[in-house]
Image (cartoon, rainbow, N blue to C red):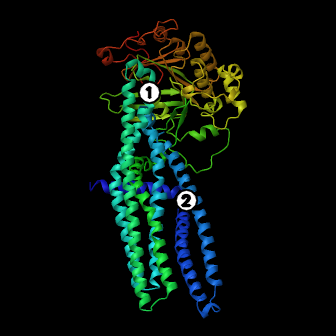
């Protein structure tokens, strides 16, 4: 418990530092305006009471002629106008500043989840991380709007009330200021302490309800087939019941806090009444001053009433700060994506990556699309597109490495195919080169890449905006050109709304072939020097696949291609085959050699029946792996040209 408190304070400091960086000046201005509004309200009520009482007494005596009504009436008008203006300004400034902070935090967190490995974590638990990006960020607004501002305003109200009442009697002013401070600290502190576990319970219940509701909606077919639809519905109802119980408990606590402040306000008013009555009896003050004192005491409790909402929300905001602080405290240099997947998933800069500050003006030149998304990475030596030195990868929770001490060089302009049995490490190697996975050991150097993944990620948006994920500044003419190169332009022109055609979730409305061509168009929009193609024509019929591959050839000229495949038609694009087995590079074959031809023939053809994918090559025995390689070829590649199991 004692160790947790410093950690919580450190998390809170990180969040507050992020607030200050995002909109520090506006946040401070909002506090000042909120304070002026509250203080003007207290002064207005006190002055109005004094003015009305003094004017009434003057009218009942001979002093009515000498009474100056202009000065206090001008003060009342000034305070009324000032309170109205400051109240309006406070609402505008505080909410504008809060929205700016939340937007900046969302962007920073989104960039934080674009770090190596984070995208895979997001795919494993998308609901939970989406909850962090939405509900947890929204909860942070309470730190400023419902905790920070009300606390500072309440302190100012206590000081002003003490000062005004101190003009009547210093002891009265000091007593009221101390009393209001004690009431605010005790009631708010006790409420916040009791609300914390309830707020945590409510946050967890809401998260569970969202997750289960999403599972119910998205998995209806599977649930019906498994006979689990009723059980899932009951789980949703149970989560909703837990959320309702937490809401009721928090509502009762807020009601009690409001009652405590009401009682404290009544006691404050009663004590002030007794005090000013005693002062009047001693002829130390008159009736107008007594009225001022009573109304100031009455108005001084109003800012404290706002603390109860902050006390209720403080626990939820603290939970959000604890969840998000590790991302906010991470090195900003790791937030900038290094490359973009043509499927819609970001391929991320490695640990060596960095980014320019988000508020830096972006350059508008012919390379702007790369500049927007890609961070400086460790570049390979001139003439190389990829350079791996003793690279190993171990997935979280795995007992064995996915890649073992891999050494690899790929020259610029080369066309290379990765082949091997399922699970050999092809996709892991692609993710490593793209920067989505960090290397556990070794050094990765690669040019900026665009990754066409196996799965096409399309969003519920227009067709044009799905394309602009790859080129945010692309105009319609450029989009049509990319669609034409991908062989999709004619079909899109037949759509009623053409580029503005709305797509459903996951690209609903497009066939599999159309979605794949749209992914190809997105690839063509990216001017990256390195293309990573992960089974680009898998699940396409032979004619569509042949057309997709044909359309890839011309734009790929001058670029480096790395293709992970089980299919002969895709590997035929390559002039070099890399054979992976159990995370090890066991063969490096070049076109024109018998081993290359044999490896190519071993791959699956278009006519292969469905079923488990055959290995590209038999796994070499331990003895073969241990055998010394034959004489190396003149090429400086790190593995022999002829692999065991293929010769």
Give the farthest residue toward the bottom: 62
Residue 434: x %, y % from top left: 49, 32
Secondary-structure class at tag 1 = helix
Q: Badges 1 and 2: C-beta atoms under 8 Å apart?
A: no
Viewer-proximal residue among 637 and 186: 186
Which corner quadrant holds the C terminus? top left
Residue 300: x %, y % from top left: 46, 72
Specify the quadrant of the image occupied by residue 79: bottom right
Residue 304: x %, y % from top left: 44, 66
Separation of residues labelled 1 and 2 (CA atoms): 48 Å
Number of the label disc, if any, that sits on residue 429: 1
Classify mark 1: residues with Cα within 10 Å, few (<14), some (14-19) or many (20+): many
Residue 608: x %, y % from top left: 48, 6
- Left or right: where 255 falls relative to 89: left
Residue where numbered disc 2 is placed: 94
**Vertical side of 543 occupied by 359: above or below:** below
- Left or right: where 105 falls relative to 361: left
Viewer-proximal residue among 563 and 321: 321
Residue drawn 38% across and 67% down? 263
């Amino acid at each position: 418990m004692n160790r947790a408190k410093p950690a919580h304070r450190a998390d809170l400091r990180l969040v507050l530092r992020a607030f200050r960086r995002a909109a520090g000046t506006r946040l401070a201005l909002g506090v000042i305006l909120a304070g002026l509004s509250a203080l003007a309200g207290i002064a207005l009520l006190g002055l109005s009471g004094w003015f009305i009482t003094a004017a009434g007494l003057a009218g009942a005596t001979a002093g009515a002629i000498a009474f100056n009504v202009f000065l206090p009436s001008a003060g009342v008008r000034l305070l009324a106008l000032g309170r109205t203006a400051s109240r309006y300004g406070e609402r505008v400034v505080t909410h504008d500043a809060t929205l700016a902070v939340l937007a900046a935090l969302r962007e920073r967190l989104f960039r934080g989840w674009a770090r190596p490995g984070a995208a895979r974590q997001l795919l494993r638990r998308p609901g939970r991380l989406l909850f962090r990006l939405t509900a947890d960020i929204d909860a942070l607004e309470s730190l400023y709007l419902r905790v920070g501002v009300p606390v500072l305003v309440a302190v100012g109200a206590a000081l002003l009330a003490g000062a005004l009442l101190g003009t009547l009697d210093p002891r009265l002013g000091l007593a009221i200021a101390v009393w209001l401070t004690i009431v605010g600290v005790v009631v708010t502190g006790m409420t916040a302490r009791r609300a914390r576990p309830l707020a945590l319970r409510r946050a967890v219940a809401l998260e569970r309800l969202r997750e289960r509701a999403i599972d119910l909606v998205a998995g209806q077919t599977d649930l019906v087939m498994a006979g689990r639809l009723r059980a899932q519905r009951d789980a949703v109802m149970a989560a909703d019941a837990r959320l309702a119980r937490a809401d009721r408990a928090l509502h009762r606590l807020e009601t009690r806090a409001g009652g405590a402040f009401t009682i404290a306000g009544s006691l404050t008013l009663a004590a002030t009444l007794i005090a000013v009555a005693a002062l009047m009896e001693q002829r130390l003050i008159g009736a107008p001053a007594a009225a001022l004192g009573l109304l100031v005491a009455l108005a001084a409790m109003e800012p404290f009433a706002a603390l109860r909402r902050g006390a209720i929300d403080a626990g939820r905001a603290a939970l959000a700060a604890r969840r998000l602080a590790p991302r906010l405290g991470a090195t900003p240099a790791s937030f900038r994506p290094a490359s973009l997947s043509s499927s819609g998933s970001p391929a991320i800069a490695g640990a060596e990556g960095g980014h320019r500050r988000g508020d830096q003006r972006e350059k508008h030149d012919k390379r702007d699309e790369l500049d927007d998304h890609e961070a400086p990475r460790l570049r390979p030596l001139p003439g190389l597109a990829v350079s791996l030195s003793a690279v190993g990868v171990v997935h979280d929770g795995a007992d064995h490495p996915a890649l073992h001490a891999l050494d690899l060089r790929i020259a610029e302009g080369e066309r290379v195919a990765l082949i091997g049995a399922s699970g050999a490490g092809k996709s892991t190697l692609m993710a490593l080169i793209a920067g989505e996975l960090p290397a556990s050991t070794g050094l990765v150097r690669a040019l900026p890449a665009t990754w066409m993944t196996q799965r096409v990620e399309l969003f519920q948006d227009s067709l044009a905006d799905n394309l602009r994920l790859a080129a945010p500044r692309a105009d319609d003419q450029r989009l049509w050109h990319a669609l034409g190169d991908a062989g999709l332009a004619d079909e899109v022109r037949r759509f009623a709304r053409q580029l503005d055609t709305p797509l459903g979730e996951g690209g609903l409305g497009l066939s599999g072939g159309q979605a794949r061509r749209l992914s190809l168009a997105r690839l063509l929009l990216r001017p990256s020097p390195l293309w990573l193609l992960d089974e680009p024509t898998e699940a396409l019929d032979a004619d569509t696949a042949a057309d997709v591959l044909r359309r890839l050839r011309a734009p790929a000229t001058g670029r480096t291609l790395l293709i992970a495949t089980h299919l002969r038609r895709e590997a035929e694009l390559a002039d070099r085959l890399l054979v992976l087995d159990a995370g090890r590079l066991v063969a490096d074959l070049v076109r024109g050699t018998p081993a290359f031809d044999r490896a190519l023939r071993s791959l699956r053809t278009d006519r292969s029946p469905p079923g488990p994918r055959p290995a590209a090559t038999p796994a070499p025995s331990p003895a073969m792996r241990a055998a010394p390689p034959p004489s190396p070829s003149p090429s400086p590649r790190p593995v022999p040209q002829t692999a065991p199991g293929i010769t």
